[in-house]
Amino acid sequence: MTASDGSRSRSFPPGGTPSSAWPLLRAGDTDAFRQALRLARQRTGVRCVFGGGVGDGALRLTEFVGTLTDSMRGLRVVPGRGLGGYVLAHQRPYAVNDYVPATTITHDYDNPVRREGFRAIVAAPVTVRGGVRGVLYAAARDAAPLGDRTTAALTEAARLLAHEIAVRDEVDRRMRLMETAAAAPAPPPPPELDALRDLHAELRGIAHEIEDTELRDRLRNACDRFLRAGLGTDGTDEDPSGERPRLSPRELDVLSYVALGCTNAETGRQLCLEPETVKAYLRSATRKLGVHSRHHAVAAARRLGLLP
């Protein structure tokens, strides 16, 4: 994924550092940062907001809303230096009422800040599992304090962004594990069937929550490959007629939880759906499978290799 300055964004596991044992599949989280900045601007009422992600031990400012110049674009902020560096080092929000003469921060980045004309600035860390993965800022061109309400609103936007990144990390980690297992020439023995069914349902539930369409589809495809590996089949011999029913992703999501013995209400809570919506998907799935009950639908889906 390419940042707005043309550079390549990088994402890292929890803690903010890359790991050779866990290389992430996604290119970056630029879209999530942009969404967080739009939310921050709306909730704080501050015209200028900006920020970026942490990588290689430093913060890189790549996303801007409401700025007048490119003076800070691509700026690399290291821990302990400037306002952003203070936030990186202390992992808590911080604000200054007048940036350039402020005595509580260092002044390594005064020139780009002065060219943009910012004076009052507040910054909040995006903290994921104990590590700062990014920083969000709100800034004004006068020295009036931005206040506690602005700090609280910016911090909430950073918290929501941290949650989104944490979800993406977990999805990415599980996809990597599944792709590694599916690509292995001699896969290890399949897990216990109950554990496989629990994991299958949980992964489909996670996919249901992902807003990124490409990432959601990749997770579902990886889930299907993992399912076939766990069942010891390539998925081509379950239906000799070649007319296997095509269930929608939502129908399979619902069936995966029904297969665990969940009620419609419990399935709805797992998938953030109303019980009546769950019932509608279940009714559609049973019709496609040519059966007349939820239990027969689960049995038919398992027989066809659609469920573990």
Image (cartoon, helix red, strand yellow):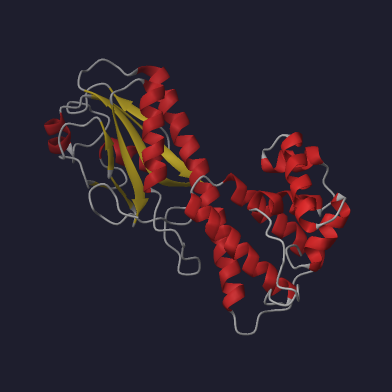
Q: Name the residue at 19% across, 40% down.
A: 72
Q: Is residue 293 above or below residue 231?
A: above
Residue 103 versus residue 288: which sits nearer the camera? 288
258 lies left or right of 173: right
Q: Seen from this angle, which residue lies furthest bottom? A: 186
The image position of residue 18, as x and y in percent, is 42, 61
Q: Quadrant of residue 86?
A: top left
- Residue sitting at 36 percent across and 49 percent down? 54
Can residue 14 be seen by looking at this rendering?
Answer: no
Where does residue 172 sit, x and y in percent of width and height? 53, 58
Can residue 270 be seen by looking at this rendering? Answer: yes
**Residue shown at 73%/48% (left/top)?**
254
Indicate the quadrant containing the C terminus: top left, top right, bottom left or bottom right: bottom right
Where's the N terminus, which quadrant? Answer: bottom left
Q: Nearer the viewer, residue 215 or 25?
A: 215
Q: Classify 184 as above or below 78.
A: below
Q: Residue at x 87, y 51 (%)?
A: 292
Q: Provide residue 264's location: percent of width, then percent of height.
A: 80, 40
Residue 69: percent from left, percent from top = 15, 35
